Image (cartoon, rainbow, N blue to C red):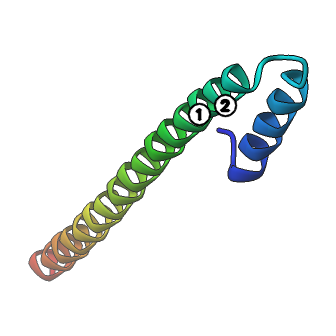
Amino acid sequence: MPNNVEINNRLTENMYCLIGAPSWQKRQIHINNMCQSKHRLLANTALQNHISSLITFLQACEAEIGSMLDASSAFLIICSK
């Protein structure tokens, strides 16, 4: 996933490529690139937040399962005595 620096570098490169184009065209392409980059960043952020919350949920499940296994083991040990 591209980070902010990569996106800024791409935008700068695009602007240098457009030096020969009319100013209105440069401006429109720059705006389009900025919008695409912003949407990409927002999508990346949403995905990262989703993955982060999923990891937190799975860690909670793991802890819960671990405590249930500990309780089951303790119960089996008590019953076997």
Question: The disc labelled 2 sits on which kind of residue?
Answer: Arg
Q: Of 7 and 57, which appears nearest the observer?
A: 7
Position of the N terminus, as image quadrant, is top right
Residue designated by label 1 = 31
Q: Quadrant of residue 33?
A: top right
Q: Of 81 and 24, which appears nearest the observer?
A: 24
Residue 80 at x, y = what percent? 15, 74
Q: Of 59 and 75, which appears nearest the observer?
A: 59
| Residue depicted at 90% across the width and 18% down the height | 20
Residue 28 at x, y = what percent? 61, 25
For residue 18, above or below residue 72: above
Label 1 close to label 2 by CB (< 8 Å): yes
Q: Of 41 and 73, which appears nearest the observer?
A: 41
Residue designated by label 2 = 27
Q: CA distance from mark 1 to mark 2?
A: 6 Å
Q: Residues within 10 Å of mark 1 (few under 14, many from 20)?
A: few
